[in-house]
Image: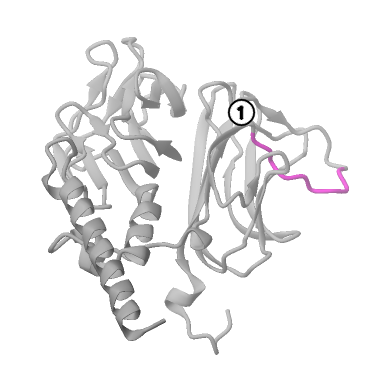
Amino acid sequence: MTSLQHFRSGLFCTLYRNFLCQTFLFIACVSPFAPTMPSLRSAFSATRSTSLLGGFQRVVTFDHLLVNVGGDFNPDTGLFRCRIAGAYYFTLTVGRYPKKFLSVMLVKNRHEVQAMAYNEYRNQGRKVQSQSAMISLSPMDTVWLLVQQNPDYALYSNVAPYITFSGYLVYPEFASSMGYLNKYLGPECLPPGYASYSWRETPEELMSAFSVARTSSVLGESSRHDKREALRFDVEYVNIGGHFNKSSGQFTCRVPGVYFFAFTVGKHPRRAVSVKLMKGTGEVQAMVFDEDTSRKRGMQSQSLLLVLNQGDIIWLYSQQDERYAVYSNQGRYTTFSGFLVYPKSDFMDKERTF
């Protein structure tokens, strides 16, 4: 190829590249037919300082907004409206009103129940219950907390808030598209001051997250089990990377790093609860326990961070003695979630080991 041909070829590539850049910028920032490209950040945390009685309103609203990155949560309506498609982690804690039942559901869109917090003790004492789940959302999906429309149910709170609701985007679906543009079109195509590029993009091979639930109970049958069996799940909210096997109940680490795990289990009537977060074949990392064997249903929650190596296995073990059980139904009392917070390369030198 002659020098002139090289020059023409290079000039054509440059002009074509500039054309793509201009087209992208027009669509993203100028065109009236497309919205301004959003920042890949969304997070909120809100509290409520007053009680709420069942039958007066169906959505839990909030009077104190602590965080609202992206402005996607409206405390006055209690609605989180998805702006960026992706996997979101939601967590809620609610107070039980004295002499009232407690039932609050995490709802997607109209009435798609994702998980619930429940307590049917009706004594004088106050108590809190927590629940969490990671769910996949598309733009304009809404997530909110539904209260039982019955005066026998209520939520308790005061100026030291018992009621909290938080959520944040863990993995945006949009990141893959932006990574492609950055790789093939170059940084000169980015809109000036485009905020999302100060955010550390996560390559797909470094993504790992799951969230699952049960819709049925598990009853312990005998204390003579020779083999410990993992708690299994039949509902899969998200399984990014495919590292969780819901039929076996096991998460297998494929990306070494720091992981966050959270689980909530329901207490079965007249049974105690003993559920452990296990690593490998029998290393107990954390547990929930309630030895109350009354006929009332309740819930217990637990969460922690773990450093995992490739091949490590994480699972939940429910005590298999006939005195114990895990309760759940279509309201999804029992949930299990986990996701990668920092891959190994982000926080350790290659020479170090765990």
Instruction: Give x and y (percent) for residue 213.
Output: 56, 34
**On screen, residue 8 above or below 323:** below
Q: Residue at x 52, y 30 (%)?
A: 333
Magenta stretch, residue numbers: 225-233
Q: Residue at x 81, y 32 (%)?
A: 221
**Viewer-nearest residue: 328 or 167:** 167
**Viewer-nearest residue: 324 or 56:** 56
Residue 112 counted in the magenta span = no
Q: Residue at x 33, y 85 (%)?
A: 3
Q: Residue at x 35, y 18 (%)?
A: 110
Which secondary structure class fits the magenta region best? loop
Task: Examine the image and state in which quarter residue 321 appears.
Answer: top right
Task: Examine the image and state in which quarter residue 123 appears.
Answer: top left
Instruction: Give x and y (percent) for residue 20.
Output: 26, 57
Q: Which residue is mark 1?
A: 327
Kind of element beneath mark 1 = loop
